[in-house]
Amino acid sequence: MSKVIKVGMADLNICKSPDIITTIGLGSCIGLTFYDPVTKIGGLVHYMLPDSTQMRNNSNIAKFADTGIDELLKQVIRAGANRNRLVSKIAGGAKMFQVSGMSNVGNVGERNALAAKAKLRELRIRLIAEDTGLNYGRTVELHCDTGEFYIKAIGKPIKII
Amino acid sequence: MGKFTLEQVNDRYVDVLREIGNVGAGNATTAIASMLGIRIDMNVPKVELLEVSKLGSAICPEDEIIVGIFLEVQSDIDGSMMFLMKMDSAQFLVNKLMGRDSDYESQFDEMDLSALKEIGNIIAASYLNALSTMTNLVITPSIPHIAVDMAASILSVPAIQFGQFGDNALLIQTEFGDDVMINGFFILMPEQDSYEKILTALGLSL
């Protein structure tokens, strides 16, 4: 029987086959996963903001792309994943309200997705799939037995990336 | 004086927010009652200080579908605000407005969404009026934007706004209605500088 591990907002955790790791209702936040297809060890971070260095209050490392992704990487490697085999998938970064212009609410989702890509490039970890942007919420699940990333949205068929 | 954070929120500020919630809900109730031609009562609002990371499940389970109406505000205060309703409340209001039976239930169509947006607009403007009157500050709202989606997804928007300068968020809960009670949640998200402006205007500078 597989267990389901739940990750909240500004939170992260790791997961091993046959378990599933999930986060519910990603809006403008990003759910980023790491997965090692050989050891079948994975992890998920649900971060809210792109850059901890722009903030004075940055004690919660899972809240930010840069510090959250670093910490997730540390934890999956400590759990036994091989860094060179790690691949990443991301989802979320929606624009929940169609506000105009360059306001923070209007573009934080997009900036969150860009932050993931920049960080992965810096870490030299391959981004192999993404489902980001648009205007709806997403519940995601990483199935550690297969590495499949399930994306569920209201009124839409389940997407597997 | 250090930069304002919600961690410094004191009881008097919460009292003021509750009063804004009270007056705002009163204004909203009157406006909706006359629009729908029904009699409406209201309860004293509750103000809650919550951890940002818990905001997604603050009003209902994270994956429950809710309605969110979002407006940007500007002039003396810059920021945004949001009004949230559970689906049963939203359906009730739309049914009343469209002259349907009160137990009618179906997916919202374009017309329903437009009606909801207008109701949300009236409610939001009622709160902003209360805030404007109490602070003597000019507050101009943008056109309303609406989303019907999972609670956690919609609430990620205020969570991110608050998350930029702290770990807490303020949620004002109001209840109004006649035979059916409408549960509404109101979130005010001023930019950091505007917070200080509001507090100063209220004579509450930290």
Image: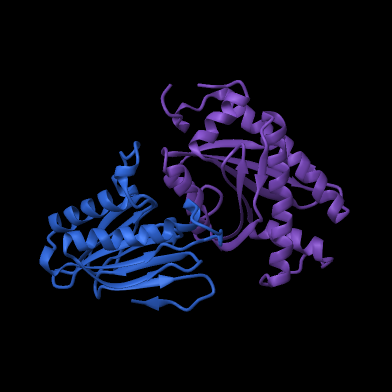
Chain colours: A blue, B purple
Q: Would you say A55 lies left or right of B117 here?
A: left
Query: Which of the image's four quarters has the N terminus of chain B?
Result: top left
Q: Would you say B77 lies left or right of A83 here?
A: right
Q: Would you say A23 lies left or right of B149 here?
A: left
Residue B83 image offset from top left, x and y in percent: 63, 50
Residue B197 image offset from top left, x and y in percent: 56, 30
Q: Residue B17, relative to residue A94: is it above or below?
A: above
Can the viewer see residue B44? no
Give whichever of A37, B141 is nearer the camera.
B141
| Residue for point 47% across, 79% down | A157
| Residue for point 31% across, 49% down | A62
Can the viewer see residue B112? yes
Q: Residue B107, relative to residue B97: is it above or below?
A: below
| Residue for point 48% across, 70% down | A153
| Residue for point 73% across, 43% down | B126
Q: Residue B111, relative to residue B121: is it above or below?
A: below
